[in-house]
Amino acid sequence: MKIINMNWFASAAVLGAALLSGCDIPPQETVQRGYRGTGMEAVYSPEVLQALVDANQVPAAIPAVSSEGPRAADVYENVQVLGDLSVAEFTRLMASITQWVSPEQGCNYCHVAGEGFAADTLYTKKVSRVMIQMTQNANQNWGAHVGGAGVNCYTCHRGNNVPQYVWNIGVPPRHASGMVHQMQNVAHQESNAYASLPFDPFTRYLLEDNAARVAGDTPLPTGHESSIESTEYVYSLMMHYSDALGVNCTHCHNTRAFAAWDQSNSERVKAWHGQQMVKEMNNAYINPTNQWLPAYRQGALGDAQKVNCATCHQGAYQPLLGANMIADYPSLSRLAPAQEPAAAMEDTTEMESASLDNGSTSGEAH
């Protein structure tokens, strides 16, 4: 006669409870994303949705001010961006940016106390100029992705000096010899949902100019990288998309025809534009700021911290659940207007005169 080991049953019960605790308890909410029968459904847990709502609250905007009066560039020194705003608008936006990016340090995050606001001593001030222009460019030229809601500094920063979700060019982690170099068989990175896939898909598709495609459009692999390795990298990027937006594959794809654009949701086109937008952000705006960054703001290879889908979305299918981020800050919805030729000529003449008065043949505007 066998003697039953009660300790084994107790251990099994504890283990079963632990496993079940990680599962979502019904009832769930299901949203039809496409035609019935295509499997295009999104399943949501009410508890998760409430947590998402709580994490995506937008701070109240500072009351609007008058656009009348002197321009900021005419009153303050060294205003290279936003100089077309009125003094009141400029001051309001600076206060808002402080609230969005450096609520603890205040103005001193970009300005040295007692030195004056015109000085460019801190790298953060120089970087902030570029980030403002990057935001304006996204809102003006990438409407196919950001839509009418747009983005502002808070979309990414959420009260942090550096957005919570950024990335650097990947360096393979230490591992035992003999394992696959790209580490696609080791699930260890949150950015691609801990998938057993290549750990750095961002360099290929959000920095370098590679098409994120799985199937080639020619019988032979000419003109398109269609190897198994590249497919794994694309899948890793797709896992990032899914995790960053808090959705599954059916948010963009028809499950019966993943590759067919004409059977996909419009979100797939929007995601494609988003990839191109992020690639431009990283190359045209973020990488050039690396010349000012201290080492602790750089990656292991000395590169600047860059953006991906999670930087803005942070688990929501729309950043901040679609809140309009530019309605209260129209100056961030467009790039500053180009300076009139006559005004530019007048400024140049004044600079040359000042240089000659100082006995110099060249001068620097401040």
Image (spheres, rainbow, N blue to C red):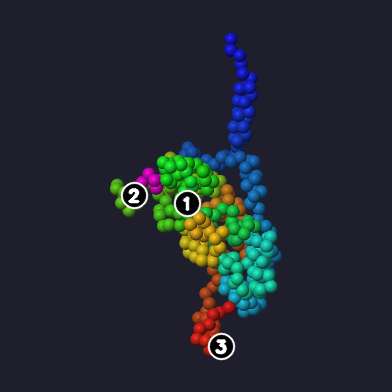
- The quadrant in which residue 2 appears is top right
Question: Which residue bears the numbered disc 2?
Answer: 217
Instruction: Kindly tell me whether residue 76 is visible in this rendering.
Output: yes
Across the whole image, how many numbered discs are drawn on residues? Answer: 3
Which of pointers 3 and 1 lies earlier in the amino acid sequence?
1
Q: Residue 57 placed where, x, y %? A: 66, 53
Amino acid type of the residue tagged 3 in the rendering: Asn
Q: What's the CA distance linking mark 2 and mark 3?
A: 65 Å
Question: Which residue bears the numbered disc 1?
Answer: 171
**Element on which disc 1 rests:** loop
Q: Which residues are magenta?
A: 227-231
Question: Which residue bears the numbered disc 3?
Answer: 358
Q: Residues within 10 Å of mark 1 (few under 14, many from 20)?
A: few
Residue at 46%, 50% (x, y): give it.
201
Judging depth in this view, the residue of 272 and 10 nearest the camera is 10
Amino acid type of the residue tagged 2 in the rendering: Asp
Residue 229 included in the magenta stretch of the image? yes
